[in-house]
Image (cartoon, rainbow, N blue to C red):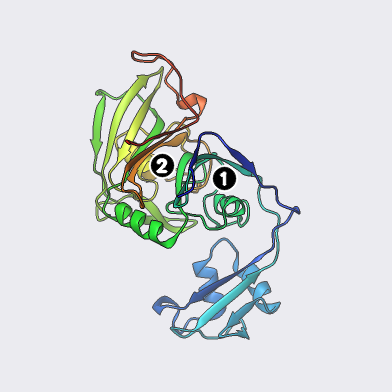
Amino acid sequence: MSQNKQGLHEEVTPLLSPSNDGCEYREQVGLDGDTRTVLAYLSQRYRHSSPTEWAARIQSGRVLVDGLPAHADSVLRRGCELVWQRPPWIEPDAPRSFSLVYEDDDVLAVAKPAGLPTLPGAHFLQTTLLYLVRAYATDAAPLHRLGRWTSGLVLCARNSHARTALMRQWSANAVGKRYRALATGLPDRDEMTITTPIGPVPHPLLGSLHAAAQQGKSSRSQVTVLERRADSFLCDVHIATGRPHQIRIHLAAAGHPLTGDPLYGPGGLPATDSRALPGDPGYLLHAAELIFRHPASGRTMTLECEPPPLLRCTMRKGGSGSWVQGRVRSPE
């Protein structure tokens, strides 16, 4: 194994032009698309574009069914291949850098800034952590994702063995995950265990999104209050499960939505009068620590990442010193 690297190392990868290269989306039509027209299916499944916009794409020949140009009234069959081509576009502004926390031949750990999407989606293709990481190390790919406005640690695998070994740990809930958050209100105790189930609920713009749901999947978050402020509190959250938006939903379900969260209100549900989306900014959440067994050596690795200023304790409880931007601890 080559000598590993750790600490602060920033790579900036600017796009070569204001627009990206465009992309092609492929899918195999399932039962929900069987006997539906191309226009009806795309308009219902991908609501980021209106039926009029979809009709224009179909008319221009940018939608194919089994390799042939489709018509708006073409009928889909289960199992057919649907391809639609998106021409180059200018992506929204977002950070175009990351910090390297740890690197060796098997794993790459980086600190994602708030505002940078982890993976392509919606209006983002190349302004993503995946694109920037691949520009730095072509063999690396993230094992998990953080929400666009969540900052902090993202772990990447650099080969198939590492990916398989680490994904097994993730599936077995054997990876320790600690987050730092700022939440509203003043809880009456310093420790909380939140087990509200999480599952899809109706949403007027997206069709559905994850929120507190009685019939949802089991979820568990352990909250430790670190510091109480005037109308909010700083806390660490250890999550035993990894449901979408789990920390935002759980703290909201406990009556303490994240400060500035535009989507999830008390009860862990989207506010009825809000048109906010999961990717909208406002909240403060940071992936501060990951603990896992190294896929090659088997050693326990503890990676830590400094939170942004508003998520740091203003008073230290004993000891002295300060945060290190990226810190790695592993027993010899």
Question: Residue 143: x, y in percent?
Answer: 43, 54
Amino acid type at image mark 1: Leu
Please give the name of the residue rendered at 38% of the width and 36% of the height, measured from the top-left corner.
Answer: 179
Q: Which one is in front, 281 or 332?
A: 332
Query: Visible in this render: residue 145?
Result: no
Q: Nearer the viewer, mark 1 or mark 2?
A: 1
Q: Kindly indicate the quadrant of the structure image that contains residue 190.
A: top left
Please give the name of the residue rendered at 43% of the width and 83% of the height, measured from the top-left corner.
Answer: 78
Looking at the image, residue 181 sits to the left or right of residue 93; the answer is left
Q: Dot 1, how many residues are within 10 Å of its Cα: few (below 14), some (14-19), or many (20+)?
A: many
Q: Dot 2, how many residues are within 10 Å of its Cα: few (below 14), some (14-19), or many (20+)?
A: many
Please give the name of the residue rendered at 69% of the width and 62% of the height, measured from the top-left corner.
Answer: 21
Say above or below: 89 vs 280: below
Say above or below: 286 vs 22: above
Q: Which mark is residue 264?
A: 2
> Disc 1 vs disc 2: Cβ atoms closer than 8 Å?
no
Q: Which one is in front, 109 or 312?
A: 109
Q: Which one is in front, 208 or 125?
A: 125
Please give the name of the residue rendered at 29% of the width and 32% of the height, measured from the top-left corner.
Answer: 223
For the residue labelled by badge 1, is the local secondary structure a helix, a strand or a loop? loop
- CA distance for labels 1 and 2: 21 Å
Q: Which residue is mark 1?
A: 116
For the residue labelled by badge 2, is the local secondary structure a helix, a strand or a loop? strand
Amino acid type at image mark 2: Tyr
Looking at the image, residue 193 sits to the left or right of residue 59; the answer is left
Say above or below: 167 vs 33: above
Question: Residue 298: x, y in percent?
Answer: 31, 48
Question: Residue 208: x, y in percent?
Answer: 41, 58
